[in-house]
Protein backbone atom coordinates (compact mmCIF):
# COMPACT_ATOMS: atom_id res chain seq x y z
CA UNK A 1 0.00 0.00 0.00
CA UNK A 2 1.23 3.50 -0.82
CA UNK A 3 2.56 5.49 2.14
CA UNK A 4 0.65 8.69 2.94
CA UNK A 5 2.40 12.04 3.03
CA UNK A 6 0.54 15.10 4.29
CA UNK A 7 2.34 18.41 3.77
CA UNK A 8 1.14 21.97 4.41
CA UNK A 9 2.20 25.52 3.52
CA UNK A 10 1.79 28.35 6.05
CA UNK A 11 -1.76 29.69 6.35
CA UNK A 12 -1.18 33.01 4.62
CA UNK A 13 -3.06 36.13 5.59
CA UNK A 14 -5.58 36.76 2.88
CA UNK A 15 -5.30 40.55 2.92
CA UNK A 16 -2.12 40.74 0.83
CA UNK A 17 -1.20 39.25 -2.53
CA UNK A 18 1.51 36.60 -1.98
CA UNK A 19 4.99 37.96 -2.69
CA UNK A 20 8.20 36.13 -3.35
CA UNK A 21 8.65 35.25 0.36
CA UNK A 22 5.31 33.47 0.43
CA UNK A 23 6.13 31.87 -2.91
CA UNK A 24 9.37 30.52 -1.42
CA UNK A 25 7.43 28.54 1.20
CA UNK A 26 4.89 27.25 -1.33
CA UNK A 27 7.51 26.30 -3.91
CA UNK A 28 9.45 24.49 -1.21
CA UNK A 29 6.36 22.52 -0.21
CA UNK A 30 5.67 21.82 -3.89
CA UNK A 31 9.15 20.36 -4.47
CA UNK A 32 8.88 18.12 -1.41
CA UNK A 33 5.37 17.01 -2.41
CA UNK A 34 6.66 16.18 -5.92
CA UNK A 35 9.54 14.22 -4.48
CA UNK A 36 7.11 12.10 -2.46
CA UNK A 37 4.82 11.63 -5.45
CA UNK A 38 7.75 10.39 -7.48
CA UNK A 39 8.45 7.81 -4.76
CA UNK A 40 4.89 6.53 -5.15
CA UNK A 41 3.49 8.06 -1.93
CA UNK A 42 -0.10 9.21 -1.70
CA UNK A 43 0.23 12.95 -1.14
CA UNK A 44 -2.10 15.50 0.44
CA UNK A 45 -0.70 18.98 -0.10
CA UNK A 46 -2.72 21.80 1.39
CA UNK A 47 -2.43 25.54 1.07
CA UNK A 48 -4.68 28.09 2.72
CA UNK A 49 -5.75 31.60 3.53
CA UNK A 50 -6.11 32.99 7.04
CA UNK A 51 -9.24 35.10 6.76
CA UNK A 52 -10.69 35.63 10.24
CA UNK A 53 -8.33 38.43 11.03
CA UNK A 54 -8.55 42.07 12.00
CA UNK A 55 -6.20 42.78 9.07
CA UNK A 56 -8.90 41.54 6.67
CA UNK A 57 -11.52 43.75 8.30
CA UNK A 58 -9.23 46.79 8.02
CA UNK A 59 -8.33 46.10 4.39
CA UNK A 60 -11.98 45.54 3.40
CA UNK A 61 -12.95 48.82 5.10
CA UNK A 62 -10.15 50.68 3.28
CA UNK A 63 -11.50 49.35 -0.01
CA UNK A 64 -15.11 50.11 0.90
CA UNK A 65 -16.06 46.47 0.48
CA UNK A 66 -18.11 44.02 2.51
CA UNK A 67 -15.79 41.75 4.48
CA UNK A 68 -16.81 38.53 2.74
CA UNK A 69 -16.86 40.16 -0.68
CA UNK A 70 -13.27 41.25 -0.04
CA UNK A 71 -12.30 37.84 1.37
CA UNK A 72 -13.73 36.08 -1.71
CA UNK A 73 -11.81 38.39 -4.01
CA UNK A 74 -8.54 37.84 -2.12
CA UNK A 75 -8.98 34.06 -2.01
CA UNK A 76 -9.25 34.23 -5.82
CA UNK A 77 -6.08 36.36 -6.00
CA UNK A 78 -4.14 33.85 -3.90
CA UNK A 79 -5.25 30.96 -6.09
CA UNK A 80 -4.23 32.90 -9.20
CA UNK A 81 -0.70 33.24 -7.81
CA UNK A 82 -0.39 29.56 -6.87
CA UNK A 83 -1.80 28.43 -10.20
CA UNK A 84 0.47 30.90 -12.01
CA UNK A 85 3.46 29.31 -10.27
CA UNK A 86 2.27 25.76 -11.00
CA UNK A 87 2.01 24.87 -7.34
CA UNK A 88 0.50 21.38 -7.31
CA UNK A 89 -1.60 21.73 -4.15
CA UNK A 90 -4.38 19.18 -3.71
CA UNK A 91 -6.74 21.63 -1.95
CA UNK A 92 -6.99 25.34 -1.29
CA UNK A 93 -8.63 25.91 2.09
CA UNK A 94 -10.30 28.99 3.59
CA UNK A 95 -10.83 29.65 7.28
CA UNK A 96 -14.19 31.33 6.66
CA UNK A 97 -16.08 28.08 6.06
CA UNK A 98 -18.89 26.94 8.35
CA UNK A 99 -17.19 23.54 8.86
CA UNK A 100 -14.01 25.18 10.06
CA UNK A 101 -15.91 27.46 12.45
CA UNK A 102 -17.77 24.63 14.12
CA UNK A 103 -14.58 22.53 14.40
CA UNK A 104 -12.67 25.38 16.08
CA UNK A 105 -15.56 25.85 18.51
CA UNK A 106 -15.43 22.14 19.37
CA UNK A 107 -11.70 22.43 20.11
CA UNK A 108 -12.17 25.54 22.25
CA UNK A 109 -14.91 23.82 24.21
CA UNK A 110 -12.73 20.75 24.82
CA UNK A 111 -9.89 22.87 26.23
CA UNK A 112 -12.33 24.98 28.25
CA UNK A 113 -13.96 21.85 29.72
CA UNK A 114 -10.64 20.39 30.76
CA UNK A 115 -9.60 23.63 32.43
CA UNK A 116 -6.94 24.72 29.89
CA UNK A 117 -8.84 27.88 28.93
CA UNK A 118 -9.76 30.34 31.64
CA UNK A 119 -11.10 33.88 31.90
CA UNK A 120 -8.77 36.71 32.81
CA UNK A 121 -8.36 40.43 32.53
CA UNK A 122 -5.14 42.02 31.48
CA UNK A 123 -3.71 45.26 30.34
CA UNK A 124 -1.20 44.61 27.62
CA UNK A 125 0.40 46.26 24.67
CA UNK A 126 -0.88 44.87 21.41
CA UNK A 127 0.53 45.27 17.89
CA UNK A 128 -2.12 45.12 15.15
CA UNK A 129 0.62 44.46 12.57
CA UNK A 130 1.78 41.25 14.29
CA UNK A 131 -1.60 40.45 15.81
CA UNK A 132 0.16 39.69 19.06
CA UNK A 133 0.73 41.10 22.49
CA UNK A 134 4.08 42.68 23.17
CA UNK A 135 6.21 42.60 26.26
CA UNK A 136 8.37 45.61 27.14
CA UNK A 137 11.41 43.49 26.26
CA UNK A 138 10.07 42.98 22.69
CA UNK A 139 10.04 46.71 21.94
CA UNK A 140 12.67 48.96 20.39
CA UNK A 141 12.34 52.60 21.45
CA UNK A 142 8.90 51.75 22.80
CA UNK A 143 7.74 50.53 19.37
CA UNK A 144 7.21 47.17 17.71
CA UNK A 145 10.46 46.59 15.76
CA UNK A 146 8.53 45.06 12.82
CA UNK A 147 5.82 47.75 12.69
CA UNK A 148 7.36 50.97 14.03
CA UNK A 149 4.72 53.07 12.23
CA UNK A 150 1.77 51.29 13.81
CA UNK A 151 1.08 52.69 17.27
CA UNK A 152 0.85 49.98 19.92
CA UNK A 153 -2.58 49.59 21.47
CA UNK A 154 -2.93 49.42 25.23
CA UNK A 155 -5.59 46.84 25.82
CA UNK A 156 -7.56 46.32 28.92
CA UNK A 157 -10.35 43.90 28.37
CA UNK A 158 -11.75 40.60 29.37
CA UNK A 159 -9.84 37.84 27.58
CA UNK A 160 -9.70 34.10 27.73
CA UNK A 161 -6.28 32.55 28.12
CA UNK A 162 -4.77 29.21 27.26
CA UNK A 163 -2.73 27.61 30.04
CA UNK A 164 0.49 27.22 28.09
CA UNK A 165 2.57 27.31 31.27
CA UNK A 166 1.04 23.96 32.29
CA UNK A 167 2.68 22.30 29.24
CA UNK A 168 6.23 23.55 29.76
CA UNK A 169 7.65 20.31 31.17
CA UNK A 170 5.80 18.10 28.70
CA UNK A 171 7.08 20.20 25.80
CA UNK A 172 10.67 20.00 27.04
CA UNK A 173 10.40 16.23 27.40
CA UNK A 174 8.84 15.96 23.97
CA UNK A 175 11.65 17.97 22.32
CA UNK A 176 14.19 15.77 24.08
CA UNK A 177 12.59 12.54 22.83
CA UNK A 178 11.89 13.87 19.29
CA UNK A 179 15.17 15.34 18.06
CA UNK A 180 13.80 15.55 14.49
CA UNK A 181 10.67 17.47 15.38
CA UNK A 182 12.11 20.71 14.01
CA UNK A 183 14.53 21.08 11.15
CA UNK A 184 17.01 22.66 10.57
CA UNK A 185 18.55 22.12 13.98
CA UNK A 186 19.55 25.77 14.58
CA UNK A 187 15.86 26.68 14.49
CA UNK A 188 15.13 23.87 16.96
CA UNK A 189 17.80 25.24 19.30
CA UNK A 190 16.14 28.68 19.22
CA UNK A 191 12.79 27.17 20.19
CA UNK A 192 14.28 25.13 23.04
CA UNK A 193 16.10 28.18 24.39
CA UNK A 194 12.90 30.18 24.31
CA UNK A 195 10.94 27.49 26.19
CA UNK A 196 13.71 27.21 28.77
CA UNK A 197 13.13 30.92 29.53
CA UNK A 198 9.67 30.05 30.87
CA UNK A 199 6.28 29.95 29.14
CA UNK A 200 3.45 32.38 29.77
CA UNK A 201 -0.22 31.69 29.12
CA UNK A 202 -1.51 33.32 25.94
CA UNK A 203 -4.76 35.01 25.02
CA UNK A 204 -7.12 33.11 22.71
CA UNK A 205 -9.92 35.63 22.41
CA UNK A 206 -10.74 39.28 21.94
CA UNK A 207 -13.75 41.25 22.97
CA UNK A 208 -13.49 44.02 20.41
CA UNK A 209 -13.08 41.95 17.21
CA UNK A 210 -16.37 41.25 15.56
CA UNK A 211 -15.19 39.19 12.59
CA UNK A 212 -14.18 35.72 13.63
CA UNK A 213 -15.35 32.66 15.47
CA UNK A 214 -17.33 33.30 18.69
CA UNK A 215 -16.23 31.36 21.77
CA UNK A 216 -18.85 28.65 22.38
CA UNK A 217 -18.78 29.27 26.14
CA UNK A 218 -18.88 33.10 25.85
CA UNK A 219 -20.16 34.37 22.49
CA UNK A 220 -19.40 37.97 23.45
CA UNK A 221 -15.79 37.13 22.53
CA UNK A 222 -14.28 35.82 19.30
CA UNK A 223 -11.21 33.64 19.10
CA UNK A 224 -8.40 35.01 17.04
CA UNK A 225 -5.39 34.04 15.05
CA UNK A 226 -3.84 31.01 16.80
CA UNK A 227 -6.83 28.89 17.73
CA UNK A 228 -8.56 29.91 14.57
CA UNK A 229 -5.73 29.50 12.08
CA UNK A 230 -3.72 26.62 13.54
CA UNK A 231 -6.71 24.29 13.87
CA UNK A 232 -7.26 24.76 10.17
CA UNK A 233 -4.52 22.17 9.63
CA UNK A 234 -6.75 19.63 11.32
CA UNK A 235 -10.28 20.81 10.58
CA UNK A 236 -9.75 20.19 6.91
CA UNK A 237 -9.09 16.47 7.32
CA UNK A 238 -11.91 15.73 9.73
CA UNK A 239 -13.64 13.41 7.30
CA UNK A 240 -10.64 11.19 6.78
CA UNK A 241 -8.71 12.32 9.83
CA UNK A 242 -7.55 8.83 10.78
CA UNK A 243 -5.92 8.44 7.41
CA UNK A 244 -4.18 11.81 7.19
CA UNK A 245 -3.55 13.17 10.67
CA UNK A 246 -0.94 13.72 12.02
CA UNK A 247 0.48 15.90 9.27
CA UNK A 248 3.92 14.78 8.12
CA UNK A 249 5.37 18.21 7.50
CA UNK A 250 4.38 21.82 8.20
CA UNK A 251 6.48 24.23 6.11
CA UNK A 252 6.63 27.58 7.92
CA UNK A 253 8.78 30.70 8.20
CA UNK A 254 10.78 31.66 11.27
CA UNK A 255 8.24 34.40 12.10
CA UNK A 256 5.63 31.81 13.05
CA UNK A 257 8.01 29.17 14.41
CA UNK A 258 7.20 29.69 18.11
CA UNK A 259 3.49 29.41 17.52
CA UNK A 260 3.89 26.15 15.63
CA UNK A 261 6.60 24.69 17.85
CA UNK A 262 5.15 25.71 21.24
CA UNK A 263 1.49 26.80 21.12
CA UNK A 264 0.35 24.26 18.53
CA UNK A 265 1.64 21.10 20.29
CA UNK A 266 0.13 22.25 23.60
CA UNK A 267 -3.21 23.06 21.96
CA UNK A 268 -3.26 19.66 20.26
CA UNK A 269 -2.48 17.83 23.51
CA UNK A 270 -5.19 19.79 25.26
CA UNK A 271 -7.71 18.76 22.59
CA UNK A 272 -6.50 15.14 22.60
CA UNK A 273 -4.69 14.94 19.25
CA UNK A 274 -1.34 13.64 18.10
CA UNK A 275 1.32 16.15 17.06
CA UNK A 276 2.53 16.73 13.49
CA UNK A 277 5.67 14.76 12.70
CA UNK A 278 7.92 17.60 11.72
CA UNK A 279 8.24 21.35 11.19
CA UNK A 280 10.47 22.69 8.43
CA UNK A 281 11.39 26.26 9.32
CA UNK A 282 12.67 28.64 6.68
CA UNK A 283 14.55 31.92 7.06
CA UNK A 284 13.41 35.24 5.65
CA UNK A 285 14.92 37.18 2.85
CA UNK A 286 15.30 40.80 1.99
CA UNK A 287 15.47 42.40 -1.47
CA UNK A 288 18.62 44.36 -2.23
CA UNK A 289 19.34 44.48 1.47
CA UNK A 290 15.92 45.82 2.49
CA UNK A 291 12.84 44.26 4.02
CA UNK A 292 10.10 43.92 1.38
CA UNK A 293 7.65 46.75 1.75
CA UNK A 294 5.00 48.28 -0.48
CA UNK A 295 6.13 51.75 0.58
CA UNK A 296 9.59 51.37 -0.98
CA UNK A 297 8.35 49.43 -4.03
CA UNK A 298 10.67 46.49 -3.59
CA UNK A 299 8.04 43.76 -3.25
CA UNK A 300 8.71 41.09 -5.86
CA UNK A 301 5.64 39.60 -7.51
CA UNK A 302 6.65 35.97 -8.18
CA UNK A 303 4.33 35.50 -11.16
CA UNK A 304 5.54 38.66 -12.90
CA UNK A 305 9.13 37.61 -12.18
CA UNK A 306 8.51 34.26 -13.88
CA UNK A 307 6.93 36.03 -16.86
CA UNK A 308 9.98 38.31 -17.12
CA UNK A 309 12.41 35.37 -16.94
CA UNK A 310 11.09 31.90 -16.11
CA UNK A 311 10.07 29.62 -13.26
CA UNK A 312 13.17 27.42 -13.42
CA UNK A 313 15.42 30.47 -13.00
CA UNK A 314 13.44 31.51 -9.92
CA UNK A 315 13.45 28.07 -8.40
CA UNK A 316 17.11 27.40 -9.05
CA UNK A 317 18.06 30.67 -7.43
CA UNK A 318 15.73 30.45 -4.43
CA UNK A 319 16.85 26.98 -3.46
CA UNK A 320 20.56 27.39 -4.05
CA UNK A 321 20.99 30.91 -2.67
CA UNK A 322 18.95 30.41 0.49
CA UNK A 323 19.86 27.24 2.37
CA UNK A 324 16.71 26.20 4.23
CA UNK A 325 16.52 27.97 7.57
CA UNK A 326 18.95 30.78 6.78
CA UNK A 327 18.15 34.39 5.98
CA UNK A 328 19.42 35.91 2.75
CA UNK A 329 19.14 38.71 0.23
CA UNK A 330 17.38 38.32 -3.14
CA UNK A 331 19.59 39.51 -5.97
CA UNK A 332 18.14 39.29 -9.48
CA UNK A 333 21.51 39.54 -11.23
CA UNK A 334 22.77 36.53 -9.33
CA UNK A 335 19.63 34.61 -10.22
CA UNK A 336 20.31 35.16 -13.93
CA UNK A 337 24.01 34.28 -13.57
CA UNK A 338 23.11 31.04 -11.81
CA UNK A 339 20.60 30.13 -14.48
CA UNK A 340 23.03 30.78 -17.32
CA UNK A 341 25.87 28.88 -15.64
CA UNK A 342 23.93 25.87 -14.45
CA UNK A 343 20.96 25.32 -16.73
CA UNK A 344 21.83 27.11 -19.99
CA UNK A 345 25.51 26.11 -19.95
CA UNK A 346 26.02 23.00 -17.88
CA UNK A 347 22.83 21.00 -18.47
CA UNK A 348 21.90 22.20 -21.94
CA UNK A 349 25.49 21.89 -23.11
CA UNK A 350 25.57 18.26 -21.99
CA UNK A 351 22.26 17.37 -23.58
CA UNK A 352 23.11 19.22 -26.76
CA UNK A 353 26.45 17.43 -27.12
CA UNK A 354 24.88 14.01 -26.82
CA UNK A 355 22.00 14.82 -29.15
CA UNK A 356 24.18 16.50 -31.79
CA UNK A 357 26.67 13.66 -31.98
CA UNK A 358 24.08 10.93 -31.86
CA UNK A 359 22.03 12.51 -34.59
CA UNK A 360 25.02 13.30 -36.77
CA UNK A 361 26.05 9.68 -36.62
CA UNK A 362 22.52 8.32 -36.77
CA UNK A 363 23.52 6.33 -33.76
CA UNK A 364 21.45 3.79 -31.90
CA UNK A 365 22.94 3.68 -28.43
CA UNK A 366 23.47 0.41 -26.63
CA UNK A 367 22.71 1.54 -23.05
CA UNK A 368 26.29 0.77 -21.98
CA UNK A 369 27.45 2.40 -18.72
CA UNK A 370 31.13 3.17 -18.28
CA UNK A 371 32.32 1.55 -15.03
CA UNK A 372 34.94 4.31 -14.74
CA UNK A 373 32.21 6.75 -13.71
CA UNK A 374 30.15 4.34 -11.68
CA UNK A 375 31.63 5.30 -8.29
CA UNK A 376 30.90 8.97 -9.01
CA UNK A 377 27.36 8.20 -10.07
CA UNK A 378 26.69 6.12 -6.94
CA UNK A 379 28.22 8.79 -4.77
CA UNK A 380 26.00 11.45 -6.35
CA UNK A 381 22.90 9.30 -6.05
CA UNK A 382 23.54 8.67 -2.37
CA UNK A 383 24.24 12.34 -1.61
CA UNK A 384 21.15 13.37 -3.55
CA UNK A 385 18.89 10.96 -1.63
CA UNK A 386 20.31 11.92 1.76
CA UNK A 387 19.99 15.63 0.96
CA UNK A 388 16.36 15.30 -0.11
CA UNK A 389 15.54 13.27 3.00
CA UNK A 390 17.07 16.02 5.13
CA UNK A 391 15.26 18.73 3.08
CA UNK A 392 18.68 20.11 2.19
CA UNK A 393 17.53 21.25 -1.23
CA UNK A 394 20.60 23.38 -1.81
CA UNK A 395 22.86 20.40 -1.46
CA UNK A 396 20.60 18.21 -3.60
CA UNK A 397 20.86 20.80 -6.39
CA UNK A 398 24.57 21.53 -5.93
CA UNK A 399 25.38 17.81 -6.10
CA UNK A 400 23.28 17.47 -9.27
CA UNK A 401 25.09 20.25 -11.07
CA UNK A 402 28.46 18.95 -9.87
CA UNK A 403 27.57 15.57 -11.38
CA UNK A 404 26.58 17.26 -14.66
CA UNK A 405 30.01 18.94 -14.64
CA UNK A 406 31.61 15.50 -14.18
CA UNK A 407 29.67 14.23 -17.19
CA UNK A 408 30.74 17.21 -19.29
CA UNK A 409 34.35 16.58 -18.26
CA UNK A 410 33.97 12.92 -19.23
CA UNK A 411 32.84 14.01 -22.71
CA UNK A 412 35.82 16.42 -22.87
CA UNK A 413 38.18 13.55 -22.06
CA UNK A 414 36.58 11.07 -24.44
CA UNK A 415 36.48 13.63 -27.30
CA UNK A 416 33.74 11.72 -29.16
CA UNK A 417 33.78 14.25 -32.02
CA UNK A 418 37.27 13.04 -32.94
CA UNK A 419 36.28 9.39 -33.19
CA UNK A 420 35.93 7.73 -36.56
CA UNK A 421 32.63 5.99 -37.09
CA UNK A 422 34.17 3.70 -39.71
CA UNK A 423 36.71 2.31 -37.24
CA UNK A 424 35.28 -0.52 -35.10
CA UNK A 425 37.24 0.39 -31.96
CA UNK A 426 36.25 4.06 -32.26
CA UNK A 427 32.63 3.04 -32.75
CA UNK A 428 32.77 1.16 -29.47
CA UNK A 429 34.28 4.16 -27.69
CA UNK A 430 31.72 6.46 -29.23
CA UNK A 431 28.88 4.26 -28.06
CA UNK A 432 30.49 3.98 -24.62
CA UNK A 433 30.65 7.75 -24.25
CA UNK A 434 27.24 8.67 -25.63
CA UNK A 435 25.42 5.80 -23.93
CA UNK A 436 26.96 6.51 -20.56
CA UNK A 437 26.06 10.18 -20.71
CA UNK A 438 22.54 9.43 -21.97
CA UNK A 439 21.79 6.95 -19.21
CA UNK A 440 23.24 9.14 -16.47
CA UNK A 441 21.82 12.40 -17.71
CA UNK A 442 18.48 10.64 -17.66
CA UNK A 443 18.80 9.71 -14.01
CA UNK A 444 20.04 13.22 -13.21
CA UNK A 445 16.99 14.68 -14.99
CA UNK A 446 14.75 12.35 -13.05
CA UNK A 447 16.27 13.54 -9.75
CA UNK A 448 15.85 17.17 -10.81
CA UNK A 449 12.23 16.63 -11.86
CA UNK A 450 10.64 17.72 -8.55
CA UNK A 451 12.33 21.09 -9.14
CA UNK A 452 12.10 21.61 -12.90
CA UNK A 453 9.52 19.10 -13.95
CA UNK A 454 8.60 20.20 -17.47
CA UNK A 455 12.15 20.65 -18.76
CA UNK A 456 13.51 17.57 -17.05
CA UNK A 457 10.76 15.39 -18.48
CA UNK A 458 11.59 16.91 -21.85
CA UNK A 459 15.24 15.89 -21.40
CA UNK A 460 14.15 12.37 -20.55
CA UNK A 461 11.95 12.20 -23.61
CA UNK A 462 14.58 13.76 -25.90
CA UNK A 463 16.99 11.10 -24.80
CA UNK A 464 14.31 8.60 -25.73
CA UNK A 465 14.52 6.70 -22.52
CA UNK A 466 11.55 4.74 -21.40
CA UNK A 467 10.75 4.86 -17.67
CA UNK A 468 11.71 1.23 -17.26
CA UNK A 469 14.84 1.45 -19.35
CA UNK A 470 16.04 -2.04 -18.39
CA UNK A 471 13.33 -3.51 -20.60
CA UNK A 472 14.39 -1.39 -23.49
CA UNK A 473 17.12 -2.53 -25.87
CA UNK A 474 18.49 0.59 -27.53
CA UNK A 475 18.18 4.36 -27.38
CA UNK A 476 16.72 6.15 -30.35
CA UNK A 477 17.48 9.83 -30.06
CA UNK A 478 14.64 12.05 -31.26
CA UNK A 479 15.13 14.85 -33.66
CA UNK A 480 14.22 17.89 -31.60
CA UNK A 481 16.45 20.88 -31.82
CA UNK A 482 15.17 23.94 -29.98
CA UNK A 483 17.48 24.78 -27.08
CA UNK A 484 15.88 23.63 -23.89
CA UNK A 485 17.52 26.33 -21.83
CA UNK A 486 18.38 29.47 -23.78
CA UNK A 487 20.62 32.02 -22.06
CA UNK A 488 18.87 34.88 -20.25
CA UNK A 489 19.81 38.55 -20.17
CA UNK A 490 19.43 40.54 -16.96
CA UNK A 491 16.73 43.20 -17.48
CA UNK A 492 16.52 46.31 -15.34
CA UNK A 493 13.08 47.69 -14.62
CA UNK A 494 14.10 51.29 -15.34
O1 LIG B 1 1.90 34.84 9.44
N1 LIG B 1 11.00 35.74 3.31
O2 LIG B 1 0.67 34.73 7.49
P1 LIG B 1 1.60 35.53 6.45
C1 LIG B 1 10.68 34.44 3.34
N2 LIG B 1 -1.48 33.97 8.84
N3 LIG B 1 9.44 33.99 3.66
C2 LIG B 1 8.48 34.91 3.93
C3 LIG B 1 8.76 36.29 3.91
C4 LIG B 1 10.09 36.71 3.58
N4 LIG B 1 10.45 37.98 3.50
N5 LIG B 1 7.62 36.94 4.24
C5 LIG B 1 6.66 35.99 4.45
C6 LIG B 1 0.87 34.57 8.84
N6 LIG B 1 7.18 34.76 4.28
C7 LIG B 1 -0.29 33.95 9.59
C8 LIG B 1 0.12 32.55 9.97
S1 LIG B 1 -0.34 30.11 10.74
C9 LIG B 1 -1.28 29.40 11.80
C10 LIG B 1 -0.89 31.78 10.72
C11 LIG B 1 6.46 33.47 4.40
O3 LIG B 1 0.76 35.82 5.27
C12 LIG B 1 6.97 32.66 5.58
O4 LIG B 1 6.79 31.30 5.29
O5 LIG B 1 2.26 36.68 7.12
C13 LIG B 1 6.04 33.09 6.70
O6 LIG B 1 5.98 32.17 7.77
C14 LIG B 1 4.72 33.23 5.98
O7 LIG B 1 5.08 33.71 4.67
C15 LIG B 1 3.80 34.18 6.73
O8 LIG B 1 2.67 34.45 5.99
Image (cartoon, rainbow, N blue to C red):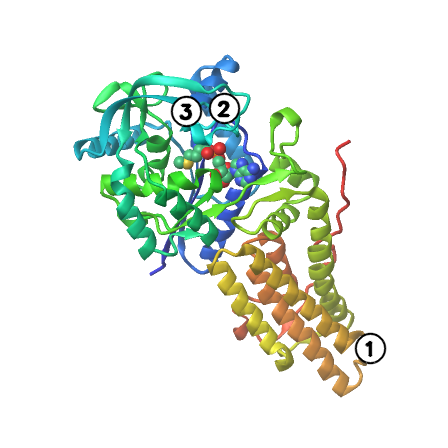
- Tell whether circle 3 marks a residue whose Cβ is less than 8 angstroms from ligand 1: yes
Q: What secondary structure is marked by label 3?
A: loop
| Residue located at (52% from left, 51% from top) | 31
Q: Position of residue 152 (x, y in %)?
A: 46, 20
| C-alpha gap between disc 1 and disc 2 | 74 Å
* Quarter occupied by residue 264: top left
Q: What secondary structure is marked by label 1?
A: helix
Q: Foreground: 486 or 389?
A: 389
Q: Dot 1 surroundings within 10 Å: few (below 14), some, or many (20 or more)?
A: few
Q: Foreground: 135 or 430?
A: 135
- Compared to 77, does 491 lie above or below? below
Q: Dot 3 surroundings within 10 Å: few (below 14), some, or many (20 or more)?
A: many
List the residue tagged with mark 2.
142
List the residue tagged with mark 1.
418
List the residue tagged with mark 3.
53
Residue 239 visible: no
Image side of residue 143 versus residue 193, left or right: right
- Compared to 112, does 181 lie above or below? below
- Dot 1 or dot 2: first in sequence order is 2
* Quarter occupied by residue 21: top right
**Residue reaching furthest to the top:** 64
| Residue located at (79% from left, 86% from top) | 423
Question: Which quadrant holds the C terminus?
Answer: top right
Q: Dot 2 surroundings within 10 Å: few (below 14), some, or many (20 or more)?
A: few
Total tally of numbered discs in the picture = 3
Q: Which of the two discs, 2 and 3, sits closer to the camera?
A: 2
Q: Are marks 1 and 3 in contact (CB under 8 Å)?
A: no
Amino acid sequence: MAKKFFITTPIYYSNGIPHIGHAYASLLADIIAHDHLSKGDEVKFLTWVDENSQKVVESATEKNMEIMEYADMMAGEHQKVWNGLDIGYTSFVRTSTVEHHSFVQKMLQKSYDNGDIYEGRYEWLYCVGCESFKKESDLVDGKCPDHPNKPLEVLSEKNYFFKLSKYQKRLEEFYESHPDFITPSNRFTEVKEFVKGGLEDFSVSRETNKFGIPLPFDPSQVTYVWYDALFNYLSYCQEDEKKWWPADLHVIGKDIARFHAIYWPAMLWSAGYELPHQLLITGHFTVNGQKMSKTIWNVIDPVLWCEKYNRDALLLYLFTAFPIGQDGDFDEKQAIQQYNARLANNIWNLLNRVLTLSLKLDWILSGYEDPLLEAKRNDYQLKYSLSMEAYDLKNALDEGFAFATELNQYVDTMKPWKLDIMDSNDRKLLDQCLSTVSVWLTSLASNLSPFFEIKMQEIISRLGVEKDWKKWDGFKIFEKWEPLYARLEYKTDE
